[in-house]
Amino acid sequence: MVFPRILLIILLLVLNINALAQLDDKDALHNVKVGKVLFDINIADNPNKLRLYLNVIRKTHIDFVRQNVKPDILLAFRGKAVLAVNTKRTDDMELTLESDLDDVADTIKELQKLGIKMEACGIAMELSNMQPKDLLPGIKAVGNTFVSITGYHAQGYALIPIY
């Protein structure tokens, strides 16, 4: 009696996953050829939350491709979020936090392989005593992300804040 119930639960889960896989954004993407998105990232103290959002950004890229829209995605790290994309680790950093930051770095590498561009705010870096060389590879230091976000918005990028 237990086995048929488990089988039924598994079947319902599979059907639910298949139903979600059929969802699309065709109304919003009507006549859209390129998905220009700028994620304004300012998550300061929670690497797990940052990793969750980075995975949602990866899913966004996948969903654009699945729906025949070329993704043009940029991540702008500002505020204390620049600490999460720093290669330097302090001696007093908790091991769990360090492991989470390593996971964030791995996810960032995966996103870069998809062609997602990234930048970090020079003002935030200066306030955090960071240098451009301290950033994870592939992340470009810019003078002021408020200025760059304004410029990208003027170029037609949709702005999505991540706090």
Image (tube, rainbow, N blue to C red):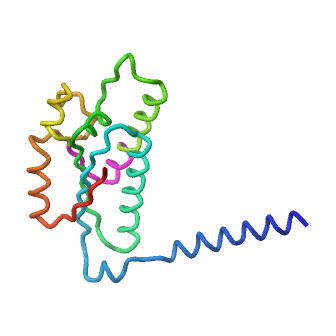
Residue 123, percent from left and from top: 12, 36
Task: State the image quarter where residue 124 is shown.
Answer: top left
Q: Identify the residue at image location x=44%, y=38%.
A: 103
- In the image, residue 53 above or below residue 13: above
Q: Identify the residue at image location x=38%, y=74%.
A: 67
Q: Identify the residue at image location x=91%, y=67%.
A: 1
Query: Considering depth in this image, is 36 or 96 the residue closer to the camera?
Result: 96
- In the image, residue 56 above or below residue 27: above
| Total number of numbered discs in the rendering | 0
> Does the magenta segment cover residue 112?
yes
Query: Considering depth in this image, is 116 or 161 the residue closer to the camera?
Result: 161
Horizontal relation, residue 146 to residue 52: left or right: left
Query: Considering depth in this image, is 91 or 58 the residue closer to the camera?
Result: 91
Q: Residue farthest to the top?
A: 91
Residue 118, percent from left and from top: 24, 47
Please report the bounds of the magenta region as a residue range: 109-119
Residue 40, percent from left and from top: 24, 52
- In the image, residue 7 above or below residue 28: above
> Does the magenta segment cover residue 80?
no
Q: Residue farthest to the right?
A: 1
Task: State the image quarter where residue 132 is shown.
Answer: top left
Residue 147, percent from left and from top: 8, 50
Horizontal relation, residue 122 to residue 58: left or right: left
